[in-house]
Image (cartoon, rainbow, N blue to C red):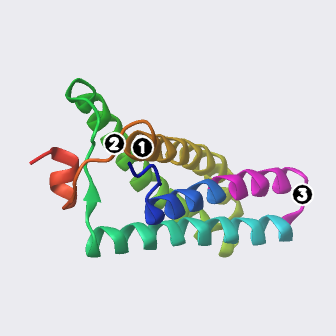
Amino acid sequence: MDNSLPILPTISTSFIVLSAVTVAIGWNLIRQKKIEAHKKTMFVAAVFALVFFLIYAARTVFIGNTSFGGPDDVKIYYTLFLVFHILLATISAVFGIVTLLTGYTNKLSKHRKLGPITSIIWFFTAITGVAVYLLLYVFYKGGETTSVIKAILGF
């Protein structure tokens, strides 16, 4: 029996975690008024998030997505949770880009308002992303690897 974890999802999920940790560090740095360190750290956090996305997108295009392999009576809850995660991820990506742009273009009033909101949304995105990974590959054995539509909707 093969108990190993799939390499690409494990690597990409690690980048989600790295991104969330660096966002937390960046948030702490700006609270200490360490502006340059904050900028560099948030840039690194964005790079980690981008690396996650690139790995995920490449895997989706070239390999497909893994469907839920757990019990049928849990599948509806998993699917609802996955849809919630996808919505959060989409919202956090948009907020993240806007927040980075307001910071780099010195629209600091907007940036100060958006930053904490964006960070909190990203933390929830990262947590739900790790939960999706755990449900797909750790708590239950992943189902078949197939197209995104089939993996999410089951048909």
- Mark identifier at residue 27: none
Question: In the image shown, does 139 or 35 lie closer to the viewer?
Answer: 139
Residue at position x 42%, y 43% in the image = 132
Question: In the image shown, does 83 or 117 lie closer to the viewer?
Answer: 83
Residue located beneath label 2 in the image: 82
Amino acid type, mark 3: Lys
Amino acid type, mark 1: Val
**Earlier sequence position, callout 1 versus callout 3:** 3
Seen in the image, is 50 located left or right of residue 148?
right
Give above or below for 60 relative to 75: below
Residue at position x 28%, y 76% in the image = 62
| SS of the residue under disc 2 | helix
- Mark identifier at residue 33: 3
Give above or below for 125 relative to 102: above
Residue located beneath label 1 in the image: 132
| SS of the residue under disc 3 | loop
Q: Is residue 127 on the magenta stretch?
A: no
Q: Is residue 29 on the magenta stretch?
A: yes
Amino acid type, mark 2: Leu
